[in-house]
Image (tube, coloured by chain):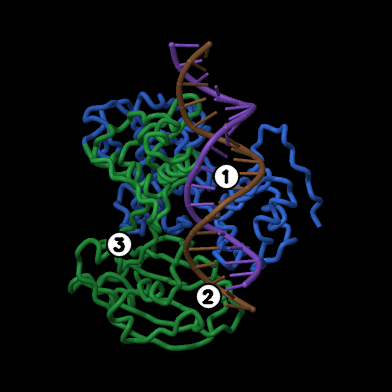
Chain colours: A green, B blue, C brown, D purple
DNA sequence: AAGTGGTCTAGACCACGAA
DNA sequence: TCGTGGTCTAGACCACTTT
């Protein structure tokens, strides 16, 4: 039994969030069984000493995250944990770090130039807007993994070679206050050209995963365009989608 | 100028939703410029004759959908339309219909059998659970496009050959009340085997997109496992992600 | 009929950002 | 200092599901 942590009304953390966190802990600790029902919201609110709207907001938050399901006239049920995984927006660098692999990056070129029309279009910026264009080769351990091309508008973030060698592009964007919040990506596959195969240490015609992505920040401002090539033998995308 | 449609308080459609729809129309019609600011919520509520919480709920709904951004002390801004596209959970069949192509499906095999352990694991059902296992070849027009394998637990939906030939799997699932709401998928690539190439009318070693997916309904119940092979020359995935 | 969640209100106070 | 959105309350009424 998780002790009933008292709510702190002087905390800057909103009450509804404290309540939601508390509920979430009880669910995750297994104290409340999967498939089980919660008390009705009026009693819950009473017992925790908050108003019903506040209680509802906490529950709504967990419903939003896929942890609970509500049905009018029935009640609130706890959903199977497998379905709870959140949608994430990460970069290859993040992924590698998370899985404990050692990412290393070689900057093959970096230049400032007007964006090619197709890329300006993808970014939704005027033709001729200046971007930093960078080609990087990413290793996992000693093995080449991906060949990556990116364009970042100059006024979003001036990219420096040294920074990019040590940190992922997304980490740099976040640090500059441009948190990627939404991205549109097209994932496909094709055979490697001779030149690509040589760079990636693969054989010509080897299957490659391709990914083209535009990312926007919270303001709806385009922060990055990327066109990447992954060795299919070494990498795949894992995604969680919701309708 | 869009006429101010009066709100209908006797309608079963919630007020906050009527308000949100109204706002959305004004934004999409271009009446309110991209990047522009909304009136503050108190005035808006006043003008529409609803309470502030109701107004807030309408705005929150549009913020959730990425259409508006709010900043305390600043105001509410309209986000660039490019960023508004919703996350969607569709099937290949849906995609083809939407783009106006004529999907055709050939059922190559359909049998009822206990799920292989790996698939039972992916579905989160007990080992040995009976599933319908189906292999389908999907055409766009006359061109083979994808070779698809699916497992659907028997107690979710008993699949019939005739139904599958005329309708997509997802359409059938929806009709049976199992609306796919969340999915986890792994997208990769590899070279086609000789057998796969023969079936798909491609040459051996041709690059193929692979996709393995488990989908759950609103209750968190696994409704489908799929393992698909797409001709990379003819298909790619388009995704919108949010953090 | 009883119990559940869904909607809506009117008003209060607070926290943050800009002028 | 002022204007903005963010939080919270107490209570009302409604709609749906189960018994």
Q: Give the residue at x 30% y 37%.
A: B123
What SS does tag 1 mark?
A: helix
Asked if residue B167 is positioned above or below residue A130 in the image, the reply reads above
Measuring from the top left, give residue B233's x and y in whole percent: 44, 59
Residue B97: mark: 1
**How far, Cα to Cα, is label 3 from label 1?**
29 Å
Looking at the rendered structure, the number of numbered marks drawn on it comes to 3
Identify the residue position indicated by label 2 in the image. A119
**How far, Cα to Cα, is label 1 from label 2?**
29 Å
Measuring from the top left, give residue A239's x and y in whole percent: 37, 53
Dot 1 falls on which chain? B
Asked if residue A79 is positioned above or below residue D14 in the image, the reply reads below
Q: Give the residue at x 43% y 68%.
A: A179
Identify the residue position indicated by label 3 in the image. A232
What SS does tag 2 mark?
A: helix
Measuring from the top left, give residue B43's x and y in whole percent: 70, 56
């Amino acid at each position: 039994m998780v002790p009933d942590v008292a709510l702190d009304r002087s905390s800057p953390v909103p009450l509804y969030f404290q309540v939601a966190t508390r509920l979430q802990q009880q669910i995750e600790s297994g104290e409340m069984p999967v498939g089980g029902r919660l008390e009705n919201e009026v009693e819950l609110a009473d017992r925790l000493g908050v108003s019903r709207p506040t209680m509802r907001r906490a529950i709504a938050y967990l419903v939003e995250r896929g942890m609970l399901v509500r049905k009018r006239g029935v009640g609130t049920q706890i959903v199977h944990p497998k379905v709870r995984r959140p949608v994430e927006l990460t970069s290859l660098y993040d992924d590698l770090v998370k899985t404990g692999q050692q990412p290393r990056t070689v900057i093959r070129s970096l230049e400032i130039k007007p964006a090619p029309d197709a890329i300006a279009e993808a970014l939704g910026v005027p033709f001729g807007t200046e971007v930093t264009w960078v080609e990087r080769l990413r290793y996992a351990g000693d093995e080449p993994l991906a060949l990556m091309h990116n364009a970042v508008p100059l006024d979003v973030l001036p990219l420096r070679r040294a920074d990019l060698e040590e940190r992922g592009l997304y980490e740099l964007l976040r640090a500059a206050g441009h948190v990627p919040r939404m991205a549109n990506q097209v994932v496909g596959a094709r055979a490697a050209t001779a030149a690509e195969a040589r760079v990636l240490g693969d054989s010509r015609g080897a299957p490659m995963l391709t990914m083209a992505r535009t990312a926007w920040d919270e303001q709806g401002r385009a922060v990055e365009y990327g066109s990447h090539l992954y060795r299919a033998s070494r990498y795949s995308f894992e995604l969680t989608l919701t309708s």
